[in-house]
């Protein structure tokens, strides 16, 4: 894993003030960050009025790294309160940061949520939870969270993933690796571009794991988009052992190359990691959770970018294991 620094965009003081002031006004108006059509409409309207300086910071990911860290915002460690024991206990904890993420999401595209995850909220709280230490979900802590495409099982997955840091006293690193940094043979690229294996729903989607109406679709791991290679990758939920030996070997070489190209990003409070979900797989190093209100706490928002063409057209026919994506569109 590389120690190379991730690309950074730093908000100028005017843009940071504009963003914070807008989020505080909206929170005062609604009193909550819980999902509602009126709140989402108000946030989209506010984001549409952002000036060009702030919008420039929200421009598309523009390097082969496939990610950037947005700096310039602050988090008051005392005022935000203790780290919730689970997403279900979070409620409106850190609500102004929820709205801040949604404002940025609206400036980048359309915020995305899932009916079957965290009660359909458009901002998720990512915190370690007792009893989930060894899972391959954001609630884990004691194990390596394997590098993966966010919601890889679903054709309606986000184009962009935003991870906003509320608390990270232990400097726990998020890992990230771009497919544009891997080195594979033409033969491997050809094999991995074929729809050979399914990607199954992860443990955060219990209802999807029981979906049996149709067989799971086989999907390609790699796709040659107009502007370069993209990927759809989640080894923890891909039955690689079912494939023939040449494909298995190519898949493992891709896994090894992503590990070689991986960078570690230790977010500080107020920093936001923006990941291109078509280029970059992300994960997390293991850590020891204390469950004393001081553990790592991230806010996660997902974004779809209208008109983007970075995925095989055949994805449109997939059933998505019965899961419905909720997309907030500006009116």
Image (tube, rainbow, N blue to C red):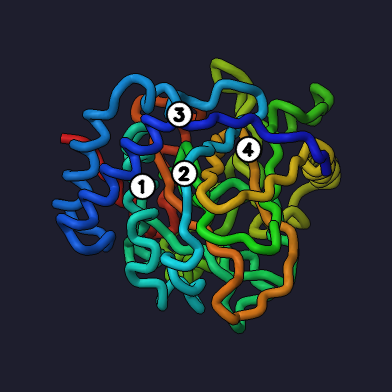
Q: Residue at x 49, y 45 (%)?
A: 162
Q: Residue at x 60, y 65 (%)?
A: 296
Which residue is identified by label 3?
Answer: 12
Which dot marks residue 49?
none
Which residue is identified by label 2?
Answer: 73
Nearer to us in this view, 98 or 312: 98
x, y percent for residue 18 = 31, 36
Mark closest to the chain's N terminus, 1 or 4: 1
Q: CA gap, disc 1 to disc 4? A: 23 Å
The secondary element bearing badge 4 is classed as strand
Q: CA gap, disc 3 to disc 2? A: 10 Å
Q: Can the viewer see residue 201 in this picture?
A: yes
x, y percent for residue 31 = 20, 63
Q: CA gap, disc 1 to disc 2? A: 10 Å
In the displayed image of the protein, which residue is found farthest to the top?
A: 226
Q: CA gap, disc 4 to disc 2? A: 24 Å
Is the residue marked by circle 2 packed among few (<14), some (14-19), or many (20+) residues within 10 Å? many
Q: Is residue 123 left or right of residue 241?
A: left
Q: CA gap, disc 4 to disc 3? A: 27 Å
Q: Tell me the mark number nearer the camera, choosing from 1 and 4.
A: 1
Q: CA gap, disc 3 to disc 1? A: 16 Å
Which residue is identified by label 4?
Answer: 280
Q: In which quadrant of the rendered image does the N terminus lie?
A: top right
Task: Tell whether label 2 touches label 1 (CB within 8 Å).
Answer: yes
Mark closest to the chain's N terminus, 4 or 2: 2
Which residue is identified by label 1?
Answer: 100
Task: Tell whether label 1 touches label 3 (CB within 8 Å).
Answer: no
């Amino acid at each position: 894993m590389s120690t190379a620094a991730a690309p950074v965009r730093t908000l100028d003081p005017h843009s940071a003030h504009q963003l914070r002031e807008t989020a505080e006004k909206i929170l005062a108006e609604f009193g909550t960050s819980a999902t509602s059509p009126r709140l989402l409409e108000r946030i989209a309207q506010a984001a549409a009025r952002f000036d060009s300086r702030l919008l420039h910071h929200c421009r598309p990911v523009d390097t082969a790294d496939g990610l950037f860290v947005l700096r310039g915002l602050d988090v008051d460690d005392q005022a935000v309160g203790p780290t919730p024991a689970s997403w279900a206990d979070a409620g409106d904890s850190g609500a102004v940061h929820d709205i801040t993420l949604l404002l940025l999401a609206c400036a980048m595209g359309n915020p995305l949520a899932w009916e079957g995850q965290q009660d359909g909220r458009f901002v998720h709280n990512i915190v370690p939870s007792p009893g989930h230490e060894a899972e391959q979900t954001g609630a884990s802590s004691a194990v390596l969270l394997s590098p993966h495409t966010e919601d890889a099982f679903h054709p309606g997955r986000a184009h962009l993933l935003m991870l906003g840091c509320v608390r990270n006293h232990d400097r726990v690193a998020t890992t990230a690796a771009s497919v544009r940094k891997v080195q594979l043979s033409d033969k491997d690229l050809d094999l991995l571009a074929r729809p050979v294996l399914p990607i199954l729903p992860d443990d955060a989607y219990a209802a999807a794991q029981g979906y049996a109406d149709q067989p799971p679709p086989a999907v390609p791991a790699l796709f040659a988009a107009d502007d370069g290679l993209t990927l759809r990758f989640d080894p923890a939920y891909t039955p690689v052992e079912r494939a023939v030996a040449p494909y298995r070997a190519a898949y493992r070489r891709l896994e090894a190359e992503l590990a070689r190209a991986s960078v570690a990003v230790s977010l500080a409070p107020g920093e936001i990691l923006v990941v291109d979900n078509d280029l970059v797989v992300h994960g997390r190093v293991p850590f020891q959770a204390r469950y004393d209100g001081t553990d790592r706490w991230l806010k996660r928002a997902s974004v779809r970018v209208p008109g983007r063409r970075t995925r095989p057209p055949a994805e449109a026919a997939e059933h998505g294991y019965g899961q419905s994506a909720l997309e907030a569109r500006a009116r």
